[in-house]
Amino acid sequence: MANADARPVLELTGIGKEFGAIRALHGVDMQVMPGEVVGLMGDNGAGKSTLVKIIAGNFRPSHGEIRFAGDAVHFSRPVDARAVGIEVVYQDLALSDNLTAAANVFLGRELKRRFGPIALLDHKAMAARALELFGELRSETRPDDLVKQMSGGQRQAVAIARTRLSNARLVMMDEPTAAISVRQVEQVLGLIHRLKEQGVAVMLISHRMPDVFAVCDRVIVMRRGEKRADKPIHQTSPEEVTALITGAKEAA
Amino acid sequence: MAMPMESPISFTNVGRIRWWQRGIFASQTGYVLLALAVLLVIMHFASPYFFTEGNMQNVAKNFSFIAIATLGVTFVIITGGIDLSVGSMMCFSAMITSMVMTELSAPGSPAGALFVHLAADGKTVIANVPGLILLVSIVAGLGVALIAGLVNGFCIAVLGLSPFVTTLGMLSIVRGLGYVVSNGRGSFPGGPDADRFYALTSGDVLGVPVPFIYLVILALTMAVVLHHTSFGRHVFALGGNEKAAELTGIPVVRVKIEVYVICALAAGLQGIIISGWLGSAPANMATSYELNVIAAAVIGGANLAGGIGGPLGAIVGCVLLEVIRNGLVLAQVSSYWQQTLVGVIIILAVLVDRIRSRMS
């Protein structure tokens, strides 16, 4: 739970982004506390994805400042964001179909064993760790199977397992429940709860109102590139959030 | 922050994929290998000369002449790229190697003075350090390949040009440079190290042609690199999903440049070996070899869309092409049919793979 005296893990001030003549984001301020689950909602084109991509280091903001755990940060690549402890589960999952589940989980940070000057992949250790992570997610996924042959839920599990490798302090999930079965949605929401218990902040980008209301402590609504609402979840309702998303209600 | 395992996974709904449905058994390489085995049996009955030691040596030597370059181009194909400049690169590297060798072996020239001196009889040229000329000239030949590979990689990875166009340009550039430096005449390895050069490129060890030995060593190295190093893993990831590779922090630009450099070096080495066998590096050497090399890679199972391929496939593709060529000669079929048949096989191999993946 967010303590009143705790420092925010993520703090955005006046974030704006222009793509040529298009203003995608304008003056977005927000804070995310450790162990807090924040739902980020908005219609297509509201600026959610742009905001996520700025925090994840895919884009640089045109204006404003990002502070992570109190320090101002400037990410030029996604790797920089990951280095400080921001993990992202992308909507298209960013998996390589031709590789195994374990290979995908460890992509870009493979475990290696050194033999003198050469470092070879430690397949066994990676498979064991991946199996452990799939176990935590309660996903029936074999580390040695190719991602090509997997179901939507298994692919999701692979993408989420990837964020569990490091000591992430903020995990952003872009539509993690969009393409999976009801049972698997429960599992993903369960995982979000467990991340929260560990003090990890989670940002959930979702269109699915029930999911947001099931796990989030706070909901932020974006519309036309601006933040229109930022409310604790128990002070709002699905109806109000829908009104804010569609613009029936301007701000709250 | 390891989370406690609440319950071990039980695979109630997810079956294990059977061994014959995974790995090599489910790959194009697998059944092309099978086709090759069948072909060898047919050849054995069709011609009594096929399985003679001499013919086998011939086959081994001939396919080794394109197989090393095929290994190189397979790296590029796995990343989803293509390199059309391998044929020209073979020629240019071979040419530079023999020209440098000849140049350094001329006693009068300023460069030659460092490397050779005349024997007491005033005619025989003797190397100051045996083997040094050979080493320097091979390094020079591979050096130009390295530069061409770097240029290819830079244009494709950094400038974002299409691999097809970039390497098509490089095909022409390198071939042109070959004509420029040689004046169109070609060149010959010469000087005191020439014999050593021939021994290293077209000799044999215990009846096994040396190019074949190089091929085996390089193929084994490639297998280890592709499947047991993070570089290899990144090569596959790049071909599978380039965007994902980028997002997960793989140094995409560096990996791309590296594969084009590897490909150019393999082609350069291949060219040097071929020139040793031919005894010269003519300016039109290895013209259109890039087509054979790419065809061999594709027949062996490398997917031009990226993400699939390996050294075994590259070699199987080369062997299949060579066995067909050799078989047609032994069967006294007009050699003009060879190219037609190779084309049919390329399409067949890819077609069978498509049918197989539709069925599963």
Image (tube, helix red, strand yellow):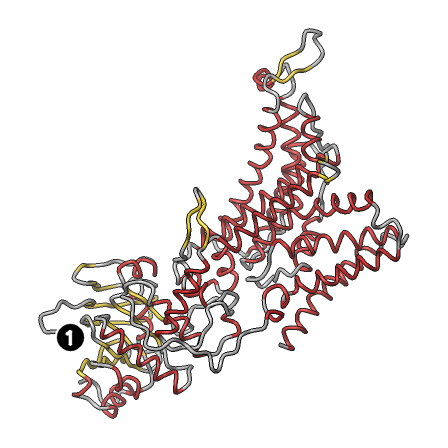
Q: Of the residues shown, which amino acid type is indicated by label 1? A: Ala
Q: Quadrant of the C terminus of chain B?
A: bottom right
Q: At x 32% / y 71%, what residue is drawn?
A: A50
Q: Position of residue B148 (x, y in %)?
A: 56, 42
Q: Please tell me which residue is depicted at 18% across the width and 63% down the height of the picture.
A: A69
Residue ranking furthest to the top: B120
Q: Which residue is mark 1?
A: A2
Closer to the camera, A180 or B106? Answer: A180
Residue A122: image x %, image y %? Answer: 44, 56
In the displayed structure, would residue B333 be above or below residue A192? above
Q: Extreme right residue here?
A: B332
Query: Compared with residue B273, is residue A47 higher up or lower down, i.e. above or below?
Result: below
In this rendering, the count of numbered labels is: 1
- The picture quadrant where one finds residue B309 is bottom right
Q: Looking at this view, name the residue that lies furthest to the left.
A: A5
Q: Quadrant of residue A152?
A: bottom left
**Rendering quarter of residue A140:** bottom left
The chain ID associated with circle 1 is A
State which quarter of the image contains the N terminus of chain B.
Answer: bottom left
Q: Residue at image x 58%, y 57%?
A: B77
Residue plotted at (67% across, 63% down):
B30
Element assignment for label 1: loop
